Amino acid sequence: MSNKVVTIGEIMMRISTPGYTRFLQADSMDVVYAGSEANVAVSLSLFGLTAAHVTRFPDNDLGRAATQALERYGVNVQHISYGKERIGIYFLENGAMQRPSRIIYDRFDSAFANIRPEHVDWDQILDGASWFHYTGITPAISQGAAEVCLNGARKAHKKGITVSGDINYRRNLWQYGKTAREVMPALIQETNIIVAGVTDFDNCAGIKGKDFGDTCRLAMEAYPNIQKITSTTRESVSSSHNRMGAQLWDGHTLFTSQEYDLTHIVDRVGTGDAYMAGLIYGWQTKKNDQEALEFAMAACALKHSIPGDINLVTVAEVEALRSGENVGKLLR
Amino acid sequence: MSNKVVTIGEIMMRISTPGYTRFLQADSMDVVYAGSEANVAVSLSLFGLTAAHVTRFPDNDLGRAATQALERYGVNVQHISYGKERIGIYFLENGAMQRPSRIIYDRFDSAFANIRPEHVDWDQILDGASWFHYTGITPAISQGAAEVCLNGARKAHKKGITVSGDINYRRNLWQYGKTAREVMPALIQETNIIVAGVTDFDNCAGIKGKDFGDTCRLAMEAYPNIQKITSTTRESVSSSHNRMGAQLWDGHTLFTSQEYDLTHIVDRVGTGDAYMAGLIYGWQTKKNDQEALEFAMAACALKHSIPGDINLVTVAEVEALRSGENVGKLLR
Amino acid sequence: MSNKVVTIGEIMMRISTPGYTRFLQADSMDVVYAGSEANVAVSLSLFGLTAAHVTRFPDNDLGRAATQALERYGVNVQHISYGKERIGIYFLENGAMQRPSRIIYDRFDSAFANIRPEHVDWDQILDGASWFHYTGITPAISQGAAEVCLNGARKAHKKGITVSGDINYRRNLWQYGKTAREVMPALIQETNIIVAGVTDFDNCAGIKGKDFGDTCRLAMEAYPNIQKITSTTRESVSSSHNRMGAQLWDGHTLFTSQEYDLTHIVDRVGTGDAYMAGLIYGWQTKKNDQEALEFAMAACALKHSIPGDINLVTVAEVEALRSGENVGKLLR
Amino acid sequence: MSNKVVTIGEIMMRISTPGYTRFLQADSMDVVYAGSEANVAVSLSLFGLTAAHVTRFPDNDLGRAATQALERYGVNVQHISYGKERIGIYFLENGAMQRPSRIIYDRFDSAFANIRPEHVDWDQILDGASWFHYTGITPAISQGAAEVCLNGARKAHKKGITVSGDINYRRNLWQYGKTAREVMPALIQETNIIVAGVTDFDNCAGIKGKDFGDTCRLAMEAYPNIQKITSTTRESVSSSHNRMGAQLWDGHTLFTSQEYDLTHIVDRVGTGDAYMAGLIYGWQTKKNDQEALEFAMAACALKHSIPGDINLVTVAEVEALRSGENVGKLLR
Amino acid sequence: MSNKVVTIGEIMMRISTPGYTRFLQADSMDVVYAGSEANVAVSLSLFGLTAAHVTRFPDNDLGRAATQALERYGVNVQHISYGKERIGIYFLENGAMQRPSRIIYDRFDSAFANIRPEHVDWDQILDGASWFHYTGITPAISQGAAEVCLNGARKAHKKGITVSGDINYRRNLWQYGKTAREVMPALIQETNIIVAGVTDFDNCAGIKGKDFGDTCRLAMEAYPNIQKITSTTRESVSSSHNRMGAQLWDGHTLFTSQEYDLTHIVDRVGTGDAYMAGLIYGWQTKKNDQEALEFAMAACALKHSIPGDINLVTVAEVEALRSGENVGKLLR
Amino acid sequence: MSNKVVTIGEIMMRISTPGYTRFLQADSMDVVYAGSEANVAVSLSLFGLTAAHVTRFPDNDLGRAATQALERYGVNVQHISYGKERIGIYFLENGAMQRPSRIIYDRFDSAFANIRPEHVDWDQILDGASWFHYTGITPAISQGAAEVCLNGARKAHKKGITVSGDINYRRNLWQYGKTAREVMPALIQETNIIVAGVTDFDNCAGIKGKDFGDTCRLAMEAYPNIQKITSTTRESVSSSHNRMGAQLWDGHTLFTSQEYDLTHIVDRVGTGDAYMAGLIYGWQTKKNDQEALEFAMAACALKHSIPGDINLVTVAEVEALRSGENVGKLLR
């Protein structure tokens, strides 16, 4: 019970061209249902935690298919509401070599964008929870989504539930008349664990540090509820080859993780969510920040090898990579 | 030159489950780009006429893919405009046996719904045209689409170009504040050739006849520009088995076509458009109404055997079926 | 709560050749996870009832994939146990035209065949249930499976829970040293609702009536807990064309359902389970036996149009077919 | 040994559009390797006879793939020769409903068309054979093919081996400067068993009878080595629905087979070859002509349900259909 | 108008094994239509230039499909002629790792090989053109193809149109009785821009320089119309990993491009054509040779990431790679 | 005749997830039939040697499909016996990047596990053979398999046939009550050529050397029939990137092969069998051990680029890689 994690966010239909074909070539596309926060929920459920996801779908077979995509992996779907609108969609063209991946979003006026506070009974949902997770995507979608998200964070914080937020600032998203700097500070105020890079803090809270450590210090001064700030670093040699690592500031020390040379990448979408899920799991089960960070970074690395948004791996698999076992082996 | 046909209407991304799988099962879907009026244009192009289609797409790779889907079959795409909005989508689940086919529309706020009169230079487009074709879907989409369509029909009529309209009333579409009865009469006023059934006339013009012939008489009295009215009849034994025929009123005589027993249906979407294209071709090339009607009905029958919205057949193939040749043969 | 249905039985990996290819041709095969009783549970869950399934899987990714196949459709999987053995498999080659479908079973020594009474806590599982369902397949698999099944039926009957059994006698299955006549009578003794044909009663209980009605009378005399007996009748014109109907004896009256002409069959596996789920749903929600029977037969008919073992339909879809609406239509 | 059958003929790459897509739609195609006489050889091998096929392939991976397509089903491939030329190809578009199937041949100047008498050591090949089979396709391809085929038939006839020929006249094929009437009579002269319809005899030997029986009488008078003449009759309701039967004249009696209603056709290519293989098997194993004819017709019927050119069925499956068993059943 | 490019050359059906399967494994193959010069035309059309392609197809559905493959991307197809022959084919097996890719050509006696001067009205075709492009493949195919190509080059040169030729010497192609040294000099005489390596000049014109620069000098002395000579260099570490660069001689200076490390290659067929299209576009739009060369090399690099022969990229995408932007990013 | 190789071992159905999907994602799987020793037989047949394989299958269509999978590549299948049991299965999930590949074996109680000495007439099978090959997998499967294998090795050794054994110790396999150390020594006693690493000798014969050379010396002392011992070394950077080499001890000298950098791996299953087949071919055709070793290692390297278990390459392709020709080229 104490390991129940609650997440909130939009789940979209991800419609992607097969293999390395371009949008102009594809006459069939692969379909999965995914969203940043739900990806975290599914990964945590596969890690053995209890996860419940809050979202809103259209009341049609696409909404039902999206619901089943969560249910299949054991995520609690009882707090999903249904409306008359459409399901958000994103079209994905997988990059290869030097050619970048491309996403075309088509999420305007989705059922989730129409979520309103009265659709979500946070008291009931947060009952028994130990963790609440949101991302900066949700408050960017609509006034309603921002309100629902802030209500959840406030209620959670008040109940003593750990609140994590993956800031993930995306300029294109903020279209409903508010800016990130108007909306995000109130949310960050309720947050204990932040995933954010230097530019995220500037874009969302006007905080500009000289570097990651400095930015963290400034952020913690401005938002005293923040306990930890973390961020991954990614060098994109090509769409098929990245190098990654992660860093974590706990207010005193800057931890850095092992670096991974990620070549022959299968699917990088959702790797940040895999990192987030690894952190949430790690902090609840590992003996210290370094171990949590390493677990998260290993989870993130593994995700690059799996098609789709979801990190379909077990704790044992992450720990094996963390300790350098089985890498590239043929396990019989 | 005298055989140039101009069509206007929305083209959507058709995303359909493969084979007979349901929405809840599919993890890949087939993608084509299609729309009722564009289907007519492509079929006419394959019949050897010159066809130009007027529409509006988002200025992204999905819009470009849709454009290429027309260009591939020789349709003139120079009058397409591009905007910032999304591409309309429809999701299709193919029925089988007693189970019906299902369509989920997701076309709200599409680029085409945002078309405005200033996007379309009808004088230039209609230059050299002998036929203008619209359907009742277009004026149902948005105020702008209705205006653009009406402008086109008026300009065409004034230039002495034959105007055809496939009324095709769909209650769910009319969402922008006007009703069909408010909008359609002005369009019908400009129209020479109407495809409509008894209920279409009631829904769009308040005309209720006792039967098809009576309705036609009343319609022609009310709208003296109408020269011919035609309609297909379809008996759905199951999703895999239909029986069809067609009738035509020329103001004096009721013609009826051969009936077709359509079993082992592959894809019935777009069969009405195949009929329309057959009529337009037939009236421009056949010696009388009966022959045009038979050509159209044979084209319609053939479409049921072809995956996708488009009637990928030649004039020779339609005529072979019309005359009972090659039916079910293995042509070497 | 009063609509919770508990089912027990093996779930196998169904590995089938694509389209109409034969085993000798296929180099890829379609994979789903299914079993007679689980198919009933999933269908009931899709109908809106609460369903819990009892089974046993190997503790590997195939067992987990099978679990998720239930979870996806909302079936409660908390009572599944896991062991070291293998997952049962059946290979399916879909017939077409005059060519029959073929199944090769490979279920020997599966995890489910190794189920033992101590793996299943019936008191806990049946808590709050209103219905218990088994088939004659389970007691045929192994001594342990037979014991677990009988324990469940006895406990359920004692608790006043309705017990249904789909006798479904298959000679090849009884390989562990007991015959159906040795095992089945004790189970039938606990059963209220029986799905069985004339030969089933002979094979399992030595009851030979002159016809269906007579057999039912004799069975009810011998087993006074039986309240209703029902059976479908199927005429196989070909693998692609069947004719079906159903009959029901309630101790007084022989009800017969509407007959269905099932042509262009997509997948007939699981149609009996669709019928069973229809009955269970019907008896809990319909006003009389005739209505329940018609609902069940319509559900069974619809299943023939859906790939896989599972009847992916809603109550509304079944009722539409039952009342002759939407048959073969294109629903927009 | 006494059941060794020798066949000769071209094997082509069959490149077909998937499902019911047209040539203009397909961006992947299915590939098998097949040819009329080789189809007979494979079917006989699957029936348990020894079959050896004589042909010529290019000495590249496509020729090797074609060789393996025979070897896979146990056909002796030791008498195949290899040259520098290309492999013959045929492109197939499967018809559906009223729409006919279409074949585009691309077999000009193939390795087989370049076969010459010195490539084939008939004495060695026919050693131990009891049956030699050819079709009228082979002598139509090239002078060399005609010579090789005639040499084989003569040598076989001289050795007392039964010679069968499926006349199968195709006007388009005769392109190398000879007509069928110039070439075929010498071949027919060596033949004991003829598959031919009324027009085949006219086209190949100038024999015009009033009907099938009369034509057979005239043919047997002209060619005293002929012992039996047989032909199938096919009514093409549509590409998806045929009705078939067969007739056989033994010089005295006209036998007719059971008729088959063949609906939901999967693939009709190769059904004549399935009939031929059924006859050859039947005459070597059945007690009389009627039984052989029925076996052949049942084999032919089954082929319609199988994708590809080859009749992938066993003797037991054919006999089950012949006796009306298992039709459309689900065999477990 | 001044940017109209005219190309001439054969378009073949490219039939390739899926993924990394070998010819011996594949039972379905991917089909596109492509040819070196047409690939250039399509790429230029996608870059926004006007492109017209001259070729000859069989008058059947495969010829029509090939035509549509050009039309789809906006290439002018009005100058294509149709005949009775076959379409040229090439079978492709994609290499991986150390294993090389393999092509089996089957283009003998194709419709294009049968092209004759009277099929092509160069005056009409070249009207308004600013560029004419051919490759050394065309004159190698047949006497007719060589004549048509030479006629085009001469007419273009006389009209002051820039003529480019990609020499691309392939020994196996020259089968019709002439050698490259007999045919090519006349063509080179009309050419302003040459793509050729050191051995190409030797094979086609008997010019042997000490190195690239020296060869260029000798070539320009012998053929004074040549203004620029360029060539790419490719190091094949494996089928999955190449390193490439390009060099250009303008008569005075040797320019060299940035080098690209091309790992995780998706499809290298058509990369030379992508380079050529990049050059033609670059010389018409860039400020100097260095910029044109860099644009061409970036276009060539991008092509390695795209399945099929065609470089489906925009100018903006090439320029982004040229300037090092977006490499391997996920563009939202 | 003198090049006939006899192999013995189980052939399983290999059911693998497509691309890089995980078991939890796949709803279709790829199917081939393969086994370590049969992979060797097929490779040798493709190299041009005569190969005969001894195994046992169930007497159903899956057993027949497995038989055809050998027959297709020319392996002699006359010594296969058939029983009532099941076919062994292994499920494969292909790894990528750091994520390991996973195999789930499901081979218990297979037809091959039920092989008994009376099923195999070694005298007949070994007639004319020059080589007998087994692996350590076979004696690990069952008592019967171990006996049959030992009988074969003894009979072969007595006849002067070279006996090779790939020790390939797998702890999980030994389940029938005997340990490797109890069974293997008798087999090794009959063996001339051993593929084994240091730990294999320890596990199977209790021989522990300080290093590979030392272990070989000790093994040859203990088992004087051994003439050569060889082993590959593999460094797994990741599932997509390995580095490999091989070493060989002939009793006097330690030979080492060229090393291969194997990146962009397609399928590593069966690479050890490719090495073994390379050795067997090499020792029968090459002039010395070094050449045989290099041939084997090049064969092994090539296999990594080919989907499935089987090394579908020719001698010419292996020799080209061995001599560094054609690496990564596009061969036309």
Image (tube, coloured by chain):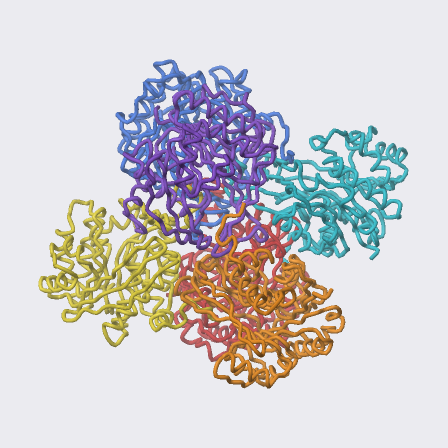
Chain colours: A blue, B yellow, C purple, D orange, E red, F cyan
Q: Nearer the viewer, residue F246 or E303?
A: F246
Task: Please tell me which residue lies in front, F202 or B68.
Answer: F202
D64 to the left or right of E319: right
Image location of residue F42, percent across then percent down: 71, 51
Question: In the depicted view, which residue is nearer to us: E199 or D5?
Answer: D5
Is D112 placed above or below C295 here? Answer: below
- Residue F126: percent from left, percent from top: 82, 50
| Residue B16, above or below A54 | below
User: At which x and y percent is residue A217?
Assistant: 44, 18
Q: Quarter of the image for the N terminus of chain B: give it.
A: bottom left
Can you say whether D118 is above or below B280 in the image? below
Q: Quadrant of residue D169?
A: bottom right
Q: Position of residue D5 (x, y in %)?
A: 68, 67
**Residue A57 seen by the camera:** yes
For residue C100, side relative to residue F299 (left or right):
left
Please indicate whether residue E46 sits to the left or right of residue D118 in the image.
Answer: left
Query: Total of numbered circles in the picture?
Result: 0
- Res A167 visible: no
Residue at 72% across / 73% down in the picture? D120
Relative placement, left or right, of B221 versus A15 is left
In the image, residue F134 sits, relative to residue A43, either above or below, namely below
Q: Nearer the viewer, residue C262 or B25?
A: C262
